[in-house]
Image (tube, rainbow, N blue to C red):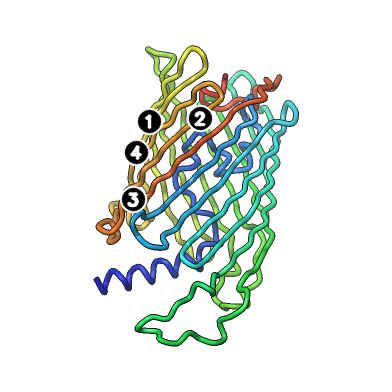
Amino acid sequence: MKKLTIYLIILLTANAFGQELNLPVFTQYLADNDFVVSPTYAGIGDNLKIRANGLTQWVGIKNAPDNQSIYADFRISNRSGLGVSAYNDKNGNTRQKGIKFSFAHHLTLDYKTKQFLSFGISYNINSFRIDVENFNTTYEIPILDPSINGDRAISNNNFDAGILYRYGGFFLSLNANNLIEKDTDPFTGLEPSRLLNYQLYSGIVIGSKTNKSVEFEPSVFFQLFNSDRRSSTDVNFKFRKLQRNGDYYWIGGSYRFLNDQFFDPLNIGPMAGIQKGKIYFAYSYQLTVNELAGYNSGTHMITIGLDFLQGISNCACTKGSSRSYYR
């Protein structure tokens, strides 16, 4: 038990200082919401798309990370799109909130072969706070440091940029997040100033040769932090069944690992979703595969969405890789 306590303290502390490097990305983007990963997806599709996510990590462990977020994107012309997202993230005694505004422009490279190129940029406003009022004495720390007082909060602005290439059912997105270095946190001296991280998201939508209403979608999501060169990869697979009226459902799975520990996954689990009319719902479960596995019931994520204000574009560059976009 003592070993587990030490492990939890180290893990939660690392998450607290690394939290501002990037918002936690689990499987939100797989709930038919690629805009989570990149601003380049803003405006792709025929609807104003809204997705609200609730994510609870390590259920059963006190003060485990918890996150709520909402994403919305829509097209403003035949070739451009706008998007906005907001989030609230809780991790122990740390709090982070923010909002992001995105713009994307889409180009047609070759109409016959369905080759498209998209560019996107986001402006981010983030606030980070430590709840010092919740600090309590323990047996090991009977007296709190008197210098820890007042409002321990800081805000910063930053930018993300990305590029997206699509060729038929294939897609490749490259993104750079937090392009501007941030001043060192004055109340800890440990908050990183290099927040830059890179993301690659790629996959292919494969239609069944015998059944046009069936699609398979393998994909990978890679993330690299510039500060300490940490990196991780998600390997995903989805099966999608389309209905004649435009509704559809899908099931899939995801496998996340550190890139130097392929056979020692961080999370693994199933997911599923359904689109019925203008309503969207998805659920994802991620089993924690490490020393915490025996002390929590995993990570749960729910996505609820709305698609409305349909407006078909004259440009094929705003169509997605899946036939589910053609609603």
Q: Decide: marks 3, 2 in contact (CB < 8 A)?
A: no
* Along the viewing direction, whichever of 261 and 96 lies nearer the viewer: 96
Which label belongs to residue 298?
3
Query: Which one is earlier in the sequence, the residue at label 4 or at label 2?
Result: 4
Q: As shown in the figure, which amino acid type bears the numbered disc 4?
A: Pro
Q: Earlier in the sequence, mark 4 or mark 3?
A: 4
| Image point (51%, 25%), residue name | 322
Evaluate if marks 4 and 2 touch, with contact meaning CB atoms under 8 Å apart: no
In three-dimensional space, the C-alpha distance between marks 4 and 2, rounded to whole angstroms, equals 18 Å
Q: Is residue 27 left or right of residue 312?
A: left
Q: Amino acid at mark 3?
A: Gly
Q: Under tag 4, what secondary structure?
A: strand
Which of label 1 and label 3 is nearer to you? 3
Residue that mark 4 sits on: 270
Residue 225 % position (x, y): 51, 59
Q: Amino acid at mark 1?
A: Ile
Q: Which numbered marker is on residue 187?
A: none
Where does the N terminus fall, quadrant-wise?
bottom left
Outermost residue, right side: 77
Name the N-terminal-most of marks 3 and 2.
2
Q: CA distance from mark 1 to mark 3?
A: 19 Å
CB under 8 Å between discs 4 and 1: yes
